[in-house]
Image: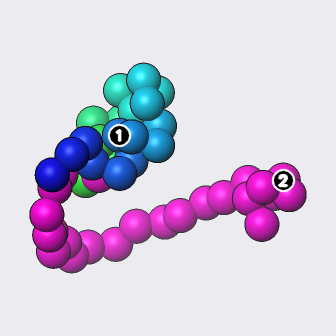
Amino acid sequence: MGTPLYRRLLGPTFAQLPAAIRDMHDFQGQRVSTGRTEVRRGTSLFAQ
């Protein structure tokens, strides 16, 4: 397998994400997680 999706999409800015976010998205294969989160998004046209 190659580079994980989020690392490919974000390029060098991936390293600027908080460690917990990087850890969650920097893997290959399957992963099962449980817990709670809150997702916020912008209001621009691209965030719609």
Q: Secondary structure at mark 2?
A: loop
Q: Which SS type dominates the magenta stretch?
A: loop
| Residue 7 image label | 1
Residue found at x 25% / y 42%: 3
Residue 35: percent from the left, percent from the top? 26, 73
With respect to residue 13, does 19 lie above or below?
A: below
Residue 26: percent from the left, percent from the top? 23, 46
Describe residue 39's horizontal placement relative to residue 12 as left or right.
right
Q: Nearer the viewer, mark 1 or mark 2?
A: 1
Residue linked to disc 2: 44
Query: Which circle's residue, 1 or 2, is located before the other in the chain?
Result: 1
Residue 4: percent from the left, percent from the top? 27, 48
Q: Per the image, is 38 magenta? A: yes
Magenta-drawn segment: 25-48
Depth check: 16 or 27 in front?
27
Depth check: 34 or 46 in front?
46
**Hey, what amino acid is under mark 2?**
Ser
